[in-house]
């Protein structure tokens, strides 16, 4: 059960990241009121306790199938293997623009299985809002508790971790963790980004929703080598073995719903994205499922019969969505592969000044023109052996290894989630890990909003630091050394 302390931490604090559901009239397969919408609730609130009880019951039944019906795809281990098996990620979509919709379907079908195994057809998966509840909820710990991370598959996967999370029930996110990766300020900034490519992912490339809060929570919960902390299931390719995985991704889905609801926040208009579906899941009868839910169809979560418990009442004028998405257009670019390392800083400097057209549009972005964003693309990032590493990106000159993230020109931070450990995914297929995408518009505005771009070359600097308190070893910039940096000015057509 949630503690009163957990309830007080989150009660009444949902205003900064709220939800407004888009009005998608006539959507094929839209919820027609045949059954009440399921409401996904914050796990540490009193309102979520009934769903938490059903989750506990359903997870216990799915874990029983490990022994009683080991080949049943609804069982706990085989559900985790949809995401990743002993050696590699399998069906999960990471490092590309399918990251939000694939995981939306993944947790939807998990929700359906819990409904079946708990005999509660109204069950709605709760979410863990780590921005405001700064530890894994205590209801996910305890001997004999199905919601604890109590499964090890070391007999099946060489090098798989022993039972138990990398954090205890008393471990708290630090203020530095919140300020850099998962706090309300970071999340609000990410949610305000109108560019889907740098938000949800590119084709290919990891967007900030994945690279920043998503990856960080996987690594933080999963533990880091050294500092007296163990490595657990949440940093493996088979991370859904830890029940908190599902609530973590429910919160990611909550943010995706919020992003979609915002004015002029448009998903990709390309049919390659809109018509894509994933038949990777299983229904209550153990049959393959998922093909009916294309990325475009699931833009409104009501099609899947659920909404979230918090809404933000925007003024009517702001609640009007664009009538049709306009394909974003790159109107200027500058790239560089020339880099040098000095005193722990990896700096990329363009071979020449940006072309005049690029300067003109980048100055427009710096001046606050609403239609323009600056994408920063980092290609060829190497996944280091020491993945408990924070990578911090700055635009402009005079960056040092100690430059704070509060400095003008700070673009953003990301970390890694590519499986870890012998046989645990670290040496397997690391899809999409080589490219990260960041929205650099704010950094451009801070540096050049009251002047203009410099006449000469532009520089982008990267530094690495320990991911979290207690990490005693992390990767150097040489370990992750990207191949190329590109800055694109994009007209979103808003």
Image (tube, grey):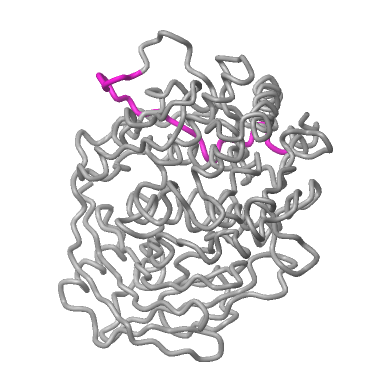
Question: What is the total number of numbered labels drawn onto the structure image?
Answer: 0
Helix, strand or loop: magenta stretch: loop
For this view, does 192 lie left or right of residue 373?
right
Residue 146 occupies quadrant: top right
Residue 306: say if magenta. no
Q: Position of residue 58 (x, y in %)?
A: 65, 25
- The quadrant in which residue 434 appears is bottom left
Q: Is residue 447 above or below residue 237?
A: below
**Magenta stretch, residue numbers:** 9-30
Q: Residue at x 54, y 84 (%)?
A: 400
> In the rendering, at what x and y percent does residue 100 appear?
41, 43
Q: Quadrant of the N terminus?
A: top right
Q: Residue at x 79, y 50 (%)?
A: 168
Q: Residue furthest left?
A: 357
- Queried whether the magenta region covers residue 19, the answer comes back as yes
Answer above or below: position of 275 versus 484.
above
Residue in the picture at 60% in, 30% down: 126
């Amino acid at each position: 059960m949630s503690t009163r302390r957990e309830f007080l931490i989150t009660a009444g604090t949902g205003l900064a990241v709220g939800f407004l559901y888009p009005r998608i009239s006539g959507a094929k397969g839209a919820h027609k009121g045949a059954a009440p919408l399921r409401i996904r609730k914050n796990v540490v609130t009193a309102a979520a306790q009934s769903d938490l009880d059903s989750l506990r019951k359903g997870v216990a039944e799915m874990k029983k199938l490990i022994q009683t019906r080991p080949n049943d795809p609804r069982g706990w281990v085989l559900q985790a293997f949809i995401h990743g098996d002993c050696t590699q990620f399998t069906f999960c979509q990471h490092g590309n623009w399918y990251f939000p919709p694939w995981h939306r379907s993944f947790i939807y079908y998990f929700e359906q299985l819990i409904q079946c195994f708990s005999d509660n057809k109204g069950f709605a998966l709760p979410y863990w809002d780590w921005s405001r509840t700064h530890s894994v909820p205590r209801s996910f710990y305890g001997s004999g508790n199905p919601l604890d991370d109590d499964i090890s598959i070391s007999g099946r996967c060489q090098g798989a971790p022993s039972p138990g999370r990398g954090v205890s029930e008393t471990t708290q996110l630090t203020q530095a963790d919140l300020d850099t990766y998962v706090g309300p300020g970071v999340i609000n900034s990410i949610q305000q980004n109108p560019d889907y490519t740098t938000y949800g992912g590119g084709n290919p490339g990891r967007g900030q929703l994945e690279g920043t809060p998503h990856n960080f929570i996987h690594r933080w919960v999963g533990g880091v080598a050294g500092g007296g902390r163990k490595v657990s299931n949440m940093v493996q390719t088979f991370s859904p073995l830890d029940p908190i995985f599902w609530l973590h991704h429910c919160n990611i889905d909550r943010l995706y719903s919020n992003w979609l609801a915002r004015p002029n926040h448009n998903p990709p208009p390309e049919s390659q994205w809109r018509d894509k579906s994933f038949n990777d899941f299983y229904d209550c009868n153990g049959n393959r499922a998922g093909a009916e839910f294309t990325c475009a169809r699931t833009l409104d979560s009501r099609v899947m019969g659920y909404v979230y418990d918090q809404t933000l009442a925007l003024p009517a004028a702001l609640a009007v969505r664009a009538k049709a998405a306009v394909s974003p257009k790159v109107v200027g670019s500058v790239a560089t592969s020339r880099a040098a390392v000095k005193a722990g800083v990896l700096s990329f400097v363009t071979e020449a000044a940006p072309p005049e057209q690029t300067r003109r549009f980048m100055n427009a972005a710096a001046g606050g023109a609403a239609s323009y964003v600056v994408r920063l693309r980092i290609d060829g990032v190497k996944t280091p052996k020491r993945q408990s590493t924070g990578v911090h990106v700055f635009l402009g000159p005079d960056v040092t290894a100690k430059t704070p993230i509060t400095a003008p020109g700070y673009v953003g931070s990301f970390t890694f989630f590519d499986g870890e450990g012998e046989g645990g995914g670290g040496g397997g297929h690391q899809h999409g890990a080589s490219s990260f995408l960041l929205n650099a518009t704010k950094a451009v505005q801070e540096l050049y909003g009251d002047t203009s771009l410099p006449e000469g070359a532009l520089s982008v600097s990267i530094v690495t630091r320990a991911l979290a308190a207690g990490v005693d070893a992390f990767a150097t910039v040489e370990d992750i050394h990207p191949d190329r940096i590109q800055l694109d000015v994009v007209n979103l057509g808003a």
